[in-house]
Image (cartoon, rainbow, N blue to C red):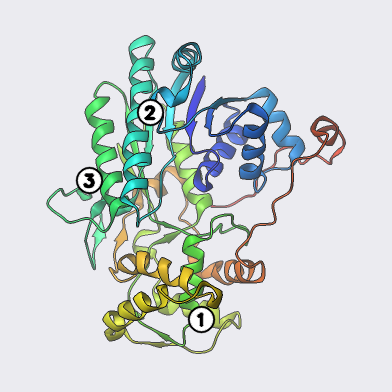
Amino acid sequence: MTIFLTGATGYLGSYVANGLLREHGQKLALLVRAKNKEEGAKRLWQSLQMHMDFPTFYEQLNDRIDIYLGDLTDKNFGLDDATYKKLAHEMTSVIHCAASLNRKSNKACFNVNLRGTLEVLKLARLAQDHHGLRRFSDVSTVAITGEVSHTNVLEDRAVDWSKSDFDPYSRTKKFCEHMVHELLPDVPVTVFRPSTVLGDSRRPETTQFDMVRAFVFLAKLPVVPLDSKWKMDIVPANYVGAGIVAVHMQDKPEHGAYNLSTGVDSPTYQQICDALQKANIGSRRVFAPQLVPTFDKLVDRLMDTPRKWGVAPAASLMKVFLPYLTYDTVFDNSRIQKVLGAAPTPFPDYCSALFKFATEGNFKYPYKPWPEDAATAARRSPRTNGVALAGV
């Protein structure tokens, strides 16, 4: 059984790939954008090294991973006919995790999310017509709900085409869900909708810093332009990855869509600030929701400041994420809790460790280089026997 996984070199995709390899011993066909197999392997190592040591990775690479060199937005991913047919004929299910998260760019979202998804669906259609697909899993987002506020969203009530969308990202991901159902009516489809994914509840390290920068920016403000009672549905990446893997590997999932979220147990901004203060990060903060319009204008001005000041990047992120910070909306997670048997670790439990890792490391992950002699390094390095960190 071979699973075709897109986005394995991305943040969430690395969690999914790691779970499939370690917990289920699955064979993976991975689409990687690279000039050659060596470069593709190095890109995968950069993505997966947060989850495994090099000997484990090297063994998985040789035993369970097939790298397909291609681009999501090219016709047939840029693969030659023989390679494309080989992929279609060997794969038995699909997890489509690749996406552009650029909420400011119509071009990026339309090219990667729409055209890219269409290419994945064309491949899935060919596989289904040849031998049948066990499942097509689409990793979407809770943002497809559009402009909502002060509510708890259930999966079956999420899509409302009459509502306006926050940005190109939410708009294109909503249409991607629509395409999957319309073009694969005879294939079992599961849609996953992560909420705001921020860090890993088991460790401080992360390789994804966009939302972390926005979090740090807000955490440093003495006056926070938010209501202390508003909730923010933040979920750790390890919980999201575990949910995708668990449901995809089920023979018959109970539902067609799952919110990968914290739901009604999502923390308030007061609870997050209390956790930071307890860790001696900042002093007592003043909440001022009436300043949201003023803050929005201030962010616009900060975006135009010289980059050497160091505030423009954070301000740009705040401009993008501000609508999501003020809508006080959570997404029911009872379905995925039933599957995993546990709720996600609350963000206040690990937010201070994430803050310290990001700020002390200047928002960079200490990547390990590819060994000059990979085979020798794989033999000589200490082994971990593929033991994953526990907890969700």
Q: Earlier in the sequence, mark 3 or mark 2?
A: 2
Of 191 and 12, nearer the camera is 12
Badge 2 crowding class, 10 Å Cα cut-off, few under 14, some 14 to 19, many 20 or more, is many
Distance from disc 3 to disc 2, alpha carbons, whole Å, reads 24 Å
The residue that mark 3 highlights is 156
The residue that mark 1 highlights is 220
Give the quadrant of residue 9: top right
Give how far across and how far down residue 164 sits, in percent.
17, 56
Query: Under tag 1, what secondary structure?
Result: loop
Q: Tell me what residue is drawn at x 53 percent, y 50 percent.
A: 238
Query: Under tag 3, what secondary structure?
Result: helix
**Amino acid marked by disc 3:** Asp
Q: Earlier in the sequence, mark 1 or mark 2?
A: 2
- Mark identifier at residue 120: 2
**Amino acid marked by disc 1:** Lys
Give how far across and how far down residue 246 sits, in percent.
47, 38
Q: Tell me what residue is drawn at x 33 percent, y 65 percent.
A: 324
Residue 350 against residue 155 in the figure, above or below: below
Badge 1 crowding class, 10 Å Cα cut-off, few under 14, some 14 to 19, many 20 or more, is few
Say left or right for 313 vs 45.
Answer: left
**Amino acid marked by disc 2:** Val
Say left or right for 102 vs 159.
Answer: right
Give how far across and how far down residue 120 sits, in percent.
38, 28
Q: Residue lying farthest left?
A: 162
Distance from disc 1 to disc 2, alpha carbons, whole Å, reads 42 Å
Circle 3/circle 2 CB separation < 8 Å: no
